[in-house]
Image: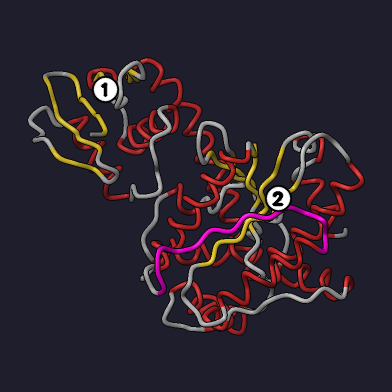
Amino acid sequence: MSLADKIVRAWPPDRWRDHHVLVAVSGGADSVALLRTLSQIKQQAAGAGKLVVAHFNHRLRAEADQDEAWVGTLAKQLALDSVVGHADSPGHLASEQAARDARYRFLTGAAERLGARYVATAHTADDQVETILMRVVRGSGIDGLSGIPTARSLSKSVTLVRPTLDVRRSEIEAALATLGQEFRTDPSNFDSQFTRNWIRSELLPSIRSRLGGDPDAAILRLSQQACDWRDAIDRVAEKLASRAIEIDASNSPVHMTFDCTELADQPAIIIQQTCRSAWRQACWPEQSMGMIDWHRLAVAVLDAQCAAFMLPGGVHVRRKGAELLLAIE
């Protein structure tokens, strides 16, 4: 099956051809292959929407400005509009997480300004394997083992999609070779001081060499099983959230009120997923919430003597009798 066929199967053009789509392009092999293939699919599918190339210059490397110019040239060659964002200053984004946060702020803001319904990124099956291993060594829960989702909300009007999440990196490289398409290589991708790079360049090769077979496929099966368990729990949690959690969006900031008596007899994992369900309904950011934070919130639901505390994202939590009150200040 060709790369185009896999993308069409994962994200049929009927869903997006009439909407503007922002395609995140770093200049690396994965994002260039996604852009070239989406451009080909769009030409065939037509529709009222258009593709727009989005590039974020992290300003972390001497070659960053060259990458920006290269992506701009590629967009022109494909007759596509482009939009560029920049880090505040060279070296300003000191960590992987800070760089990621800045990139997604840019993508979300650019999509909203341009009226784009979707932001497409080029995460692959290899990224999925690396992410799951990274979460395993960090002690992640079932949501973490579920891996990178195929889609998630960036804002009330913008959805992030990952059409190549089932595609292996070797398939990406083969597709580019067939097209004769060049791409940029980021030398920092080979720096093992970053956890993901260490997993990619040292841990995974050791696992493959030691175990043989296809350990990547086994890890992906683990992820799928975790997804199935999470989805089953989520269905229970969503029903429970509708009964036990009131979301007041009439005021700013949004408030949540938990009826702790409704949740008192539930296992901690169900309470945690119920809280996640309410978070999503309220469009509160989940990225900064770790397992410890969700566990702390579940304990607060069960502990009538819980003292007030704050969660990531400026969420204030306080107990008032049988209710737990949450608000972002």
Residue at image coords 46%, 75%: 60
Residue at image coords 30%, 19%: 251
Identify which amino acid the numbered label 2 is placed on. Val
Segment tinted magenta in the rendering: 77-90
Which of pointers 2 and 1 indicates the residue nearer the eye?
Answer: 2
Judged left or right of residue 238, residue 161 is: right
Residue 268 drawn at (x, y percent) = 30, 37
Quarter containing the C terminus? top left
**Neighbourhood count class around disc 2 (C-alpha, 10 Å): few under 14, some 14–19, many 20 upward:** many
First along the sequence among labels 2 and 1: 2
The secondary element bearing badge 1 is classed as: strand
Which quadrant holds residue 135?
Answer: bottom left
The secondary element bearing badge 2 is classed as: strand
Residue 90 drawn at (x, y percent) = 41, 73
Task: Out of 205 and 100, give the one closest to the viewer.
Answer: 100
Residue assigned mark 2: 52
Task: Out of 325 and 292, give the one closest to the viewer.
Answer: 325
Residue at image coords 49%, 54%: 145
Mark 2 in CB contact with mark 1 (< 8 angstroms): no
Task: Out of 173 and 270, give the one closest to the viewer.
Answer: 173
Membership of 5 in magenta stretch: no
Residue 88 drawn at (x, y percent) = 40, 63
Judged left or right of residue 56, residue 162 is: right
Membership of 78 in magenta stretch: yes
- Say the numbered circle drawn on residue 258: 1
